[in-house]
Image (tube, rainbow, N blue to C red):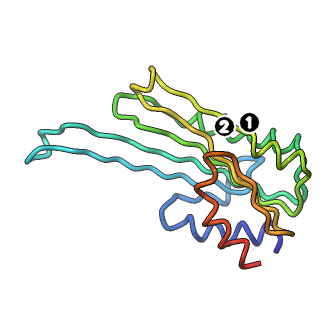
Amino acid sequence: MTPTEALDLILRSYVRYYDVIREGAEAPFAAEARFHSHGETYVLVKSARISEADSHEYVYFAAEDALDGERAVALEQAAWEKGLAHVKPHSAHRNSDVTLVILAGSMTPEAKLAVKKSHHSKSYKHSLQGWSNYRAIALETSSGELVYNRLGKDLKKLFRNISNQR
């Protein structure tokens, strides 16, 4: 399976809950996906609102023939910066997370280590106006090997299903 074929498969699972942008995704990414959620709690009537919370996730997809450590770090930085550019902290903001998905034909050991060690987080007004976390996962399409950072582990099951279809 090529990285582009894997991208098509993975986007099918995202399109149900996310706004997927394939055409017009900003370089160096092949696609983007955005998720927005707004929740409110109230007593008896909506005008008696107790609290509200906004959650967002920005996912960036990269399809690479070969991934080395330098390129992995460049993709990480680009995803984090582009994701944070969307964040608008306010009193009802809970979180705005950034996720990087790399689909590569092959990965060097340095690239695998860069994905595993990647970590970003940011809080807004000491978390009173929310926070942002960074997740990363990379799939080597030639072998089906998955590499992810600590927060990217949550995506393992979804990507295992994709890699088993190769």
Residue 45 % position (x, y): 9, 47
Amino acid type of the residue tagged 1 in the rendering: Gln
Residue identifier under label 1: 77
- Give residue 145's position: percent from left, percent from top: 79, 64
The image shows residue 99, relative to residue 52, as above or below, that is: below
Q: Position of residue 46 (x, y in %)?
A: 14, 45
- Mark 1, residues whose alpha carbon is within 10 Å: few (<14), some, or many (≥20)? some
- The dot on residue 22 is none
Question: 33 and 25: which one is in front?
Answer: 33
For residue 50, which quarter of the picture?
top left
Please give the name of the residue rendered at 57% of the width and 38% of the height, measured from the top-left corner. Answer: 133
Task: Look at the numbered disc 1 and give the secondary structure of its residue.
Answer: helix
From the top left corner, tell me how far across and down residue 25 is, in percent: 68, 52
- Kindly identify the residue that appears in the image at 41 percent across and 27 percent down: 129
**Distance between mark 2 and mark 1 Cα atoms:** 5 Å
For mark 2, does the 10 Å Cα neighbourhood hold few (<14), some (14 to 19), or many (20 or more) residues?
A: many
Q: Which element is circle 2 on?
A: helix
Question: Do callouts 2 and 1 mark residues in contact (Cβ within 8 Å)?
Answer: yes
Q: Residue at x 86, y 69 (%)?
A: 142
